[in-house]
Image (cartoon, grey):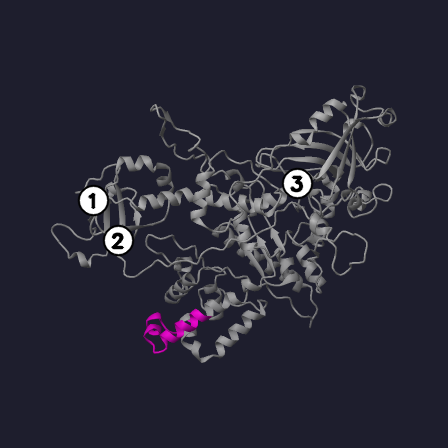
Amino acid sequence: MDLTDSLSSLDESGPVIASGKRLALSTKLRSKFFLVAPADADPWFGFTLDFPLGQDQAANEDSGFGIRHEGKASGDAVVPVDNHRLTIRFPRGGFQTIVEDATLPLMNRFPNAKRRDHGMTVLKVVIGDASVSIQGFGYPFANVDDLEVEGWVNNKPIVDGHTLIDILRSKRFVFVLPKPVAAAAHTFNPDRLPAPFSYPYGPNQEWNLPLYRALIAQNKGHRFIPAFRHPDDLSHITSVVQAAVQDVLWIDDAVNEILAIRFPAYFVSPETSASEPRAVEGIKQFYIVVALTPQFRTEYDSAWRRLIKAEGFRVRLFNSHESLSPHETWNCKIVEYPSNLSALKPHPVRKHELVLCARRPTRDEFQKKQPYEVKMFPDRNGFYDWMVKPDPRSTNAPPMLRALPSINFLDIEDKAYANAIVAEALPQDQARFRGYLSNRPLGLAAATLAMHAKLGKILCSAPTNVAVDNFASRLDTRTRTVVERYNRGLQGGQPRRRHTFVVRAYRPEHESVAFKRLLQDSRISDGAAPKPFARRPSKWRLHLSCAFWLLVLLRSPAVRGLHPDDSPVLHEMQQAIHDHDSTVLLRDVATGAITWEQFKEADGYTRAMTVANDLLAYIPDQADLLVARGVSIDEAANMHRADLYCVWGNTLLPCFLFGDPKQLSPTVMTNSEQHKAVLHRDDEGDVDMESEQNPVGFLNRFAMDGKISALQYLQGNGIPVYR
């Protein structure tokens, strides 16, 4: 990378727009000139303009604007910055440069410039029909300490009536560089730029496993430097998609290879003994001893260590070596300490062998899932192209900046409720909390209750089930606190505020099983969660689940009663259930008026359970995800960007991200593992393990990109953060 301080102007004799420190001029805007060929990024030729954010951003933070950060080049951290940087890149092949010695009158304008006696250079850039590309334009900006700089950013004239837009749209730029002309002509020669960079994975990043495999095999190599900004959508999507794919695809390849290998095995029943034989047909569970080989363990060691962490497996059983397809497929799980099993005492197990516990299936438990649809997302490179595009409603107006859409989350009719939300912050933080919520670009902010009050239904998510559970519980607790604070000061006859209806939704089949078990025994609480054999355990929990709310509506002793200030929707549903004849049996068994056995033997049992399942499905419909008006993410510092995009999509709904930047980064399982070397022999028989035809490279070239969390990526792009 070659760079130097520079003076930016539109003319040699014109006023100074910005300057570098080495030129020793007192200007509020700083400028540097660059010729850059960074690793794993597009090389460029251009300059930067730095706009001050104020000393340590202290005044901005106190006002509620938030703190601006930028991502470090290493990709392992984001750090606060004192300046907002615009990066202006000249179009390759679309400009000419003129390099000249600075004249004496011009040099006299810089009497205190460093190394002035070595000479100075004037570099002129003239652009043809193409336009510059700009990074960092349009991001939220504030400098509470210097309103003049704020005005410049918001299109007020900087020098001689020229606004920032005028400067950026100019076809001619003049720079004064503190370098002798020969050195400057060599250092900043655009011909030195290498070829443009792009990820070698093509334009199609849709879900296509054969294509992924082919591209990965053709493009082995080093790990890419992580990127916080991308030149276009394709670059952004490639890094997100490939980081997810390359983390696991080699495991899938190993699974397919292992599936093609058949091992001999024998079955041991834990239910029989030599003295008490039993017909095989009546046995439902077996231990299966599989004769893996030491060679298999060695060859698939890395993949096998990952695979055996799964909760369960499927074992395919063949009747003969000649069979092309399995006779049956059973669910099973690994027995970790087979030597402790009495049934296996007569069957010594060797170190390389595998013992499985399997159940004979009674039905097909495996259902094919719908294919996943990959969406397109913004490149987060800035908003210059959109903001300077003419507004179709004012075609005759002079060029102006189009403002980014923003929203005041406290602009609701009920000002007392807005005040009750702000009161959730500590007293010393309430002023800046109010300021932060009062002008948020459609993107990120900090308080879901304010979002709900302004917009309506909100979809909440987090990277783990535990995090979602905690998020839902906190929201439910805080909405009750806020409503209680609001209602406490009401006069007689004034309408009361109601609790926000928070639903922690789980898979419908898990809700149904858990609800049924709670009807049988109202004391088991979270113990009602489904417990499938050799399958991933259900993450279902009772609190705020659909089953929880249905039991509340049915007045079950398993849960709390309906509060007078609970959502009107819940009160309406409870009344409807009470008035409907089809729910009589359901209400009786839920309240304990009849036993589960009486309920099950009743004529209306089947109908009642159908009604229950319909109600379980109806409850989340009251928070229909298809009509969510905003998105809120907790523990976003631990969330993959791919997971955020699955929730947020490309709808640009208002999105609040919460998280601790010091939290562990998103989990990336494949970091330093490399492709297996393939032996090649030349004509003389010499072995070449890293030939050009088969280079050894990292299995996950985007591992470091994968560790950039959703919060860190947006924070590193300059979105203000409330802390």
Q: Main secondary structure of the magenta part?
A: helix
Evaluate if marks 3 and 1 touch, with contact meaning CB atoms under 8 Å apart: no
Q: Secondary structure at mark 1?
A: helix
Residue 662 horizontal/vertical position (percent): 57, 40
Going 51% across and 46% down the picture, which residue do you hit?
241
Which residue corresponds to mark 2? 326
> Would you say 277 lies left or right of 190 here?
left
Of 685 and 325, which appears nearest the observer?
A: 685
Q: Amino acid at mark 1?
A: Leu
Q: Amino acid at mark 2?
A: Pro
- Give the CA distance from mark 3 to mark 1: 60 Å
> Would you say 308 lies left or right of 429 here?
left
Q: In the displayed image of the protein, which residue is found farthest to the top?
A: 117
Q: Residue 69 — which label?
A: 3
User: Around disc 1, counting alpha carbons within 10 Å, would you say few (fewer than 14), some (14 to 19), or many (20 or more)?
Assistant: some
Q: Quick one: label 3 or label 1, which is nearer the N terminus?
A: 3
Q: Which stretch is magenta?
A: 591-614
Q: Quick one: label 3 or label 2, which is nearer the N terminus?
A: 3
Q: Secondary structure at mark 3?
A: strand
Of 11 and 511, which appears nearest the observer?
A: 11
User: Around disc 3, counting alpha carbons within 10 Å, would you say few (fewer than 14), some (14 to 19), or many (20 or more)?
Assistant: many
Which residue corresponds to mark 1? 344
> Would you say 386 lies left or right of 16 here?
left
Q: Secondary structure at mark 2?
A: loop
